[in-house]
Image: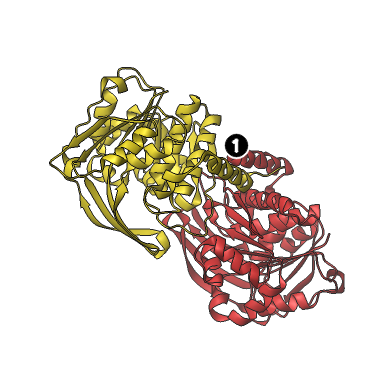
Chain colours: A yellow, B red
Amino acid sequence: MGLITVGTVAFDDIKTPFGHAEKVIGGACTYTSWSASYFTNDIRLVSIVGGDFPKEELNKLNERGVSTEGLEIVEDKKSFFWAGEYHDNMNQRTTLATELNVLADFDPVLPASYKDAQYVMLGNLTPEVQMKTINQLSTDPKLIVLDTMNFWMDVAWEPLLEVVKKVDVITINDEEARQLSGKYSLVDAAAAIHEMGPKYVVIKKGEHGALLFSEGRIFSAPALPLSQVKDPTGAGDTFAGGFIGYLAKTDDISFENMKRAIIYGSVMASFCVEEFSLDRLKTLTQDEINARVEIFKDLSMFDL
Amino acid sequence: MGLITVGTVAFDDIKTPFGHAEKVIGGACTYTSWSASYFTNDIRLVSIVGGDFPKEELNKLNERGVSTEGLEIVEDKKSFFWAGEYHDNMNQRTTLATELNVLADFDPVLPASYKDAQYVMLGNLTPEVQMKTINQLSTDPKLIVLDTMNFWMDVAWEPLLEVVKKVDVITINDEEARQLSGKYSLVDAAAAIHEMGPKYVVIKKGEHGALLFSEGRIFSAPALPLSQVKDPTGAGDTFAGGFIGYLAKTDDISFENMKRAIIYGSVMASFCVEEFSLDRLKTLTQDEINARVEIFKDLSMFDL
């Protein structure tokens, strides 16, 4: 089942108490695609980079089953760049620089070979770019997942609502769910967002896990308590990649299977934060993933 | 298996966005005892009240199997009183008044009939009172659970450490675990606290659930997402009551049974916050408890 991943492919500069990663590979779509590649090898990436983006990184993605036919390369421009520093035990971060570069002109064009994808992951981007992606699909996909953030609620409310109307799943954090719905209780927020379009609402709570809401049903997934978090960058995108990658692999969008997908997403995110940038995601083995799934079972299972 | 509950029995004045409960029954020991009474009817309360405390409240406790032989009544003085107001959707509260009254002179005396209790819940109080309780036990109990808070870490560090050394389980929130251990990661904090004495560390995270740590094992219990929280007062004490009440009932302190106890504690806390004061705890039925346990199962179970 083909999976489209749309979002940024970029450079990051990341400072945490554990070190400083200078001009490393980043971007929501990069994290999502790497994460999903452990579940499916029919991934169709849509993004834009400058001539400065290393070709060997694209080759590595291709080797993982990620098509970069939908990646626009603007040779005479620079890739999107984000610099940030994490403080206070990783709970807060300061953006030190955001250089849009090629991203300012991003007008996604889906290759013909992409258009019948059944699974679509719309990474955090302007709602306009997200809508343009949806509008180019030739078939009605089985599942569209939207990631967004408070910034778009502040500056692009109406276009965001149009996209929200079109998607099946939205992944946001608890504060964003409250802002989008105007409701404080997450139960009420999920019900209100359901009315806006998405059948499923996934609320990402970082170290407190994730919640899945759908039509009155709720699933609460734990996060794995870790002794050391080196770099939280990309954890949410990695979660999304594991989530939709597992759904695309199993081609089952029932609530029960969504629960499993949430666990796989959480497992992938727990690896992501162990090292800087994509370092941990690039070295994973299926055995390591399976072993961590068992840890998640031990973490949350009880017998009554 | 006899269960001793030590702590405050008091009056509260509570303002929340849902109303104002004036001079209602409160106190950690009251919440804990009511909650535990749904699991065992051999509860031995240790506390102090003034002559103003309604006798019918004590009768109700007696009817639930809570002995008040260890409750000192100082007829010519007033009971402990706390007034508070909840803001910002219940996440923050302001203390408006704290009148120690009889609590200033609390010197717990365990009746002879109490001293062989196998389960002991030390509610949040000065470490000196907690230690005096431990020192009066005639037999080495099977399980001592300690609840404490950041205040005692600030003003009574050494006496607190002495108590911590003597107990089997400590229940605190995440910030308190960090303060007590000097470690930010909850995994590291739990390991450090384990070295201080308690074999089990229970970290209460309110709306984010609870974590149980013991010798490298971790269990993550969800909290039930609720549409409406009327009054969070006593939720932690109610959790503790369900936790130790279930353990006393089953008389099994294995890690697997502790997990179940955490779920029962969470179930009881989820009821507590639905109404002001002890209103919801006083009207519960076993069927309601069982039904909510099923909801907790649905909330956290997945099949892989």
Determine the image quadrant of residue B106.
bottom right
Residue A12 point in image, percent of width and height: 28, 51
Note whether B31 is above or below B165 in the view shown: above
Q: Which residue corresponds to mark 1?
A: B302
Determine the image quadrant of residue A83.
bottom left
Quadrant of image for the N terminus of chain A = top left
Residue A46 visible (yes or no) = yes
Q: Nearer the viewer, residue A287 or A209?
A: A287
Residue A110 point in image, percent of width and height: 25, 25
Residue A262 point in image, percent of width and height: 50, 38
Residue A147 visible (yes or no) = no
Q: Residue at the spot x=45%, y=27% of the render?
A: A248
Q: Amino acid at mark 1?
A: Phe
Q: Nearer the viewer, residue A72 or B149?
A: A72
Subunit under mark 1 = B
Is B67 left, or right, of A95 in this rendering?
right
Residue A58 point in image, percent of width and height: 30, 37
Note whether B8 is above or below B241 in the view shown: below
Q: Residue at the spot x=23%, y=49% of the render?
A: A81
